[in-house]
Image (cartoon, grey):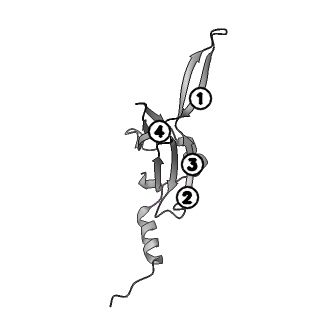
């Protein structure tokens, strides 16, 4: 979970990773982006001695976490751990810029939700 952007990263055993806006963001419960945790197999073509990449099936994800660099808090990473024992570090910086995902003021958003919520009368 990335509180400053109300962004939740989720993954499943099918290797599917998705990013969602959650409350109190105005676009709560909308998927922002998704991708598959694909294995990249690198091999050398014996005839031309060039590096080739083959894409295999998606690998199940067991753990996922957002992280920021200590030196530059804008430097965002998404780290996944999969069932093949691989840790992958994804750089969502370009995605954040393309989707216009800006930091939000959580206090203001929660207050606005509280003001919109119907009040209950206690008997």
Whole-number angstrom distance, CA of label 2 to CA of label 1: 29 Å
Q: Which residues are magenta?
A: 101-105
Q: Are marks 4 and 1 in contact (CB under 8 Å)?
A: no
Which residue carries the number 4 mark? 60
Q: Position of residue 11 (x, y in %)?
A: 47, 46
Residues at badges 2 and 3 in contact (C-beta under 8 Å)? no
Q: N-terminal of the two: label 1 or label 3? A: 3
Quadrant of res 67: top left
In this figure, which residue is indicated by the disc labeled 2? Answer: 30
What residue is shown at x 39% (from left), y 84% (from top)?
A: 120
Q: Residues within 10 Å of mark 2 (few under 14, many from 20)?
A: few
Q: Main secondary structure of the magenta part?
A: loop
Q: What residue would you read off at disc 3?
A: 33
Callout in the foreground (2, 1): 1
Q: CA distance from mark 3 to mark 4?
A: 18 Å
| Marks 4, 2: nearer the viewer | 4
The answer to whether 25 is drawn above or below residue 67 in the figure is: below
Front position in the image: 78 or 99: 78
Residue in the picture at 59% in, 50% down: 99
**Are the residues at dot 2 and dot 1 in contact (C-beta closer than 8 Å)?**
no
- Distance (Cα) linking label 4 and label 1: 15 Å
Mark 2 to mark 3: distance in Å?
9 Å
> How far across and down, in percent of the image, does residue 87 sit?
42, 33
| Between marks 1 and 3 in the image, the one whose residue lies nearer the viewer | 1
Q: Position of residue 3 (x, y in %)?
A: 42, 55
Circle on res. 55: 1
């Amino acid at each position: 979970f990335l509180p400053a952007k109300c962004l939740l990263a989720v993954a499943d055993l099918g290797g599917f990773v998705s990013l969602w806006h959650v409350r109190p963001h105005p676009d709560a419960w909308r998927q922002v982006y998704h991708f598959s945790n694909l294995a990249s197999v690198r091999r050398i073509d014996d005839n031309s001695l060039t590096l080739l990449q083959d894409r295999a099936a998606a690998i199940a994800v067991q753990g996922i976490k957002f992280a920021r660099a200590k030196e530059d808090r804008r430097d965002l990473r998404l780290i996944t751990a999969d069932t093949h024992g691989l840790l992958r570090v994804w750089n969502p910086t370009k995605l954040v810029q393309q989707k216009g995902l800006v930091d939000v003021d959580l206090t203001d958003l929660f207050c606005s939700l509280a003001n919109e919520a119907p009040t209950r009368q206690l008997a």
